[in-house]
Structure formats: C-alpha cells, structure tokens
Amino acid sequence: MNEFDFIRQLRELTHSRRRSSRIIKGIGDDATLIREHVDRDLVVTTDLLVEGTDFHREVTPAHLLGHKALAVSLSDIAAMGARPRWSMVSLGLPKETWTTGFKESFFEGYFPLADSYGVELVGGDISESKEIIIDSIIIGEVSSGSAILRSTAQDGDQIYVTGKLGGAAAGLKLIEMGARLNQEAGGSRPEAGTEPLAGATGLHYDEETNEAETINRLLRRQLQTQPRVGWGIVMGEEQLATSMIDISDGLSSDLQHLCEESHVGATISAEFIPMDEDVRTICGRRALDPLSLALHGGEDFELLFTVRSENVPRLPKRVDGIQISRIGEIKAEAGLWLHENDRIWQLRPQGFTHFATQS
C-alpha cells in the first residue's frame, strides 16, 4: 500500500460515515471545499514537509524552507481556482535547532511570500521533535460554485500547463550530485566542507561557460518554489478551466490523478511539453534525460488544467509574466498516451510516491 492507496481507503471510510451537508468536496482533490455562505465557499489545504524526505537541512537555507512551506500550499489553493486568505503553520524542531536562528530565518522567508498574496498568518503550533517537521495550512475563498475540481474534465478538452517543466527535478538531481546554492552570486559551486548527499556522484564545472549560473537557477527551482496563484485566480474567476491540478508529483502522475477523478484518458505530445531551457543545457553533460525530468520529475508546482475548445481563445497569453502551453487533449477512453517522434507510447505514471514498493 502506497500513499495514494491509503488515501483511497480513507476516502471510502469517510463516505460510510455521517457527512456534513456543507462539504462540497472532501478527500480526493488539491483541497477541501466547504460551503461558507450563499455566495462564497471556503477552500482548505494542508501540506507536510519532513526533514530527510521532503528536504535536506544541510542544503536548504531556513528562509527558503519557510518560503517553500507556504508556496506548496499556495499552489494547492491556486489549483482550486481560489484566492488565498489565511494561513497556519506548525513546527516540530529539535532542541539544538531551537537555540539557533532557524525559526527566525524560517519566517523571514515565509512572511514576504505571504505578504505578496495578502495572506495573513492566524495560528499554528510548536513542538519539540527529533527532526524538523513543518505542517502548512492555508484557507482560501472562491465564489460559490466557481471552484475548479480534478473531477470535471471532459472528452475533447484541451490540456494546458503553466510555465516550464523539469527544472525542480533537475535541481534535486544537482543537489544529489553535490551542488549547493550560492545565494550571493550566480554560481553554485559546492561550499567548503559540504558533501554530496548519500549515494550521489561527483559534480564537475566548466569554468569557460555560464554553467554555474545555470545550475544556480535550477537549484532555486527546487528550493524556492514559485506558486502560480495569479493563474489560479484567473482560471477560477473567469471560469475558463474545466478541471485543474498542480504538478507536485510529476506531470505523468498528476495527469493520471486528474484523469482518474474525471473518468477519462489523455493524449499528450512530447514536442509540446514546455521544458526548462536550463534543463536542456545541463542534461546533455550529465546523462540526464530532459523529457523524463519534465514528464516524471515533481515539485515544479506549475498548474495543469483543461479547457473546452471554444474557450481557448479566451485564455490570457500571460499572467504575472508566466505563459501557458497546450500539450494535448482529453479522451473519453481511459489511459494516458504520449506522442513522440511519430510514435505513440502508453504513458505510465512515474512521479514520486511515498511508501512506493521498490522494484
């Protein structure tokens, strides 16, 4: 049983119990949808970040961890087409970490992102723990009936993604190879005394190129997530998307989640997938496949959404400077398919899954 198997089990258990009539959407989407007033619904989401699984303390500055903890939850609110309003955060910290400047630096990264979207911190909890544990909760609002779900894609809908894909996964690969973020310059040469993560290979730099700057940008894609809140709000307020999900586990896996909830299938084209140019630059020298990173690498936190063909002309070209790309089409028949080099392959989800069975 992996995390998604267990979530499905919990979902079935909740359906067999008494349920409030105010719950519009419970387990099974990016966030829970609750009826608040006649004209307004609440959207609530929570995310857990655990040291050693979701981040590594030795390579993640505390202020960037504060930023990311909020950003991943903001992404869930965006995926529902909602506007974020309030947040809560709980921290579990080792005693030795409590006596450092970690907690202060964490919120130095948290508050600027919260302020940029008008999000108010209203509560949380603090406890002593063996490792760093972060629980982030955000409450948003959406006009009644305007929330965008995973379960409403239809045959013939066009599939779009925001931004570029593969950058966060490439950043993680580079961290595993020993790269460390240079916060004062464009370079990212490992700092003195740092070691690659367990099992990582060496990282070599070409002094005659701008490779260090490229690596630094990719590390920031992994460590400093930028949620697409603006796109989410536009999709919700203009009622442009028929379904939406954020890309946290990987394009292949999250497209599968969306299709399963909507009881449809999808066909996408490799040539249309918007790959991060920095990924293309780095991959050629490190035996990494940019398409694989774009398809299966997680934590890009871009938005994946579907649109009826007649509404495609209404889509903005950019929101907050971020473009979108059409990558495929929803099909009535179940299954995911990838067009690549005049061939059609069955696309099997290979994104990250907690508690997955190792082959």
Image: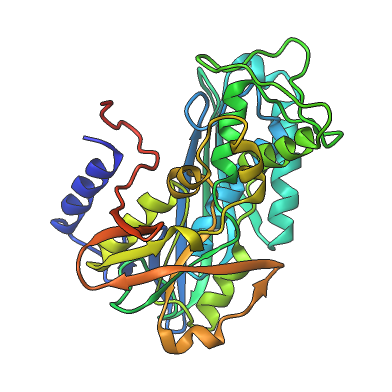
In the picture, measured across the screen, residue 123 lies left or right of residue 331, that is: right
Q: Is residue 178 above or below residue 312?
A: above
Q: Please state, as top left, top right, bottom left or bottom right, where the C terminus lies in the image.
A: top left
Q: Residue at x 17, y 58 (%)?
A: 15
Q: How many marks?
A: 0
Q: Nearer the viewer, residue 144 or 306?
A: 306
Q: Nearer the viewer, residue 281 or 274?
A: 281
Q: Residue at x 58, y 53 (%)?
A: 87
Q: Is residue 292 above or below residue 75?
A: above
Q: Is residue 113 above or below residue 208?
A: below
Q: Quadrant of residue 102?
A: top right
Q: Quadrant of residue 228?
A: bottom right
- Pick out the residue farthest to the left: 16
Q: Residue at x 62, y 23 (%)?
A: 57
Q: Nearer the viewer, residue 64 or 296?
A: 296
Q: Position of residue 207 (x, y in %)?
A: 82, 26
Q: Position of residue 164 (x, y in %)?
A: 59, 56
- Pick out the residue farthest to the right: 184
Q: Is residue 216 above or below residue 13?
A: above
The answer to whether any part of residue 27 appears in the image is no
Q: Position of residue 31 (x, y in %)?
A: 41, 59
In the picture, measured across the screen, residue 226 lies left or right of residue 166, that is: right
Q: Position of residue 37 (x, y in %)?
A: 44, 79
The answer to whether any part of residue 223 appears in the image is yes
Q: Quadrant of residue 104?
A: top right
Q: Please state, as top left, top right, bottom left or bottom right, where the N terminus lies in the image.
A: top left
- Pick out the residue farthest to the front: 342
Q: Residue at x 22, y 63 (%)?
A: 19
Q: Nearer the viewer, residue 142 or 242?
A: 242
